[in-house]
Amino acid sequence: MQQSELNQYVSNTASQQNTFVSAKRTQISERNKDLQDELASLRKSLELLETPVEEPVKLGKGVTICGHCHHRGHGNDARHACKYVKCIGFRYCGYQKLHPEHTQDISDVKRQIKRLESEVRKVDETIKTITNFESKSETYFSPRCSRT
């Protein structure tokens, strides 16, 4: 094989490798964008879950919270059954301790956010590594000056 053929081969190999690396970087960048979008969505839902809710109107003179409708002022027992509609969730009454499913939802979203942030960091590192490799591969795989 002559020197010019060798230079041509090395040049073709380097361009093929750079094309592959560029395609891989593009693919990983798209994955990173998808993760960022999902992370933004989760942060928005966490913000909505943590939005404070006003306490419902007091219905009666007592200080206890009804176990049925979650309004202050009366109770729900055998002698005095609550005549109001049952509480439908945290967004209605605002008492987080009476709705453990709401607390669980917040914990789940926070856990998902942590997992996604970790994944985004890994993808960012991968992109940096590929970019670094691309810049070095141009130097290492470019044809050298030919000896004649």
Image: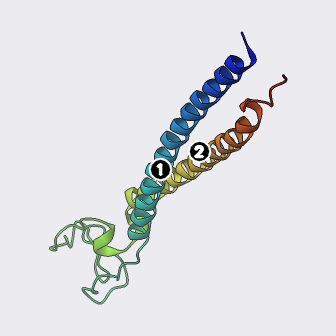
Which residue is labeled 2 in the image? 123
118 in relation to 12, above or below = below
Give the labeled residue for mark 1: 35
**Residue situated in front as seen by the camera: 45 or 97:** 45
x and y percentages locating residue 138 in the rendered image: 70, 38
**Front residue of 4 and 36:** 4
Does residue 104 show up? no
Mark 1 or mark 2, which is nearer the start of the sequence? Answer: 1
Task: Give the residue displayed 30% in from the left and 84% down from the top.
Answer: 73
- Where residue 119 sits: x, y (%)? 57, 45
Residue drawn where x is 39% and y is 72% of the image: 95
| As drawn, 17 above or below 22 | above
- Around disc 1, counting alpha carbons within 10 Å, would you say few (fewer than 14), some (14 to 19), or many (20 or more)? some
Q: Quarter-wise, where is residue 135 in the image? A: top right
Q: Determine contact: label 2, label 1, CB under 8 Å.
A: yes
Q: Is residue 30 above or below residue 42?
A: above
Which amino acid, by three-letter code, is at mark 1?
Leu
* Residue type at numbered disc 2: Val
Answer whether residue 50 is visible to the viewer in this image.
Answer: yes
Which mark is drawn over residue 48? none
Relative horizontal placement of residue 37, taking residue 117 as reference (left or right): left
Residue 59, image quadrant: bottom left
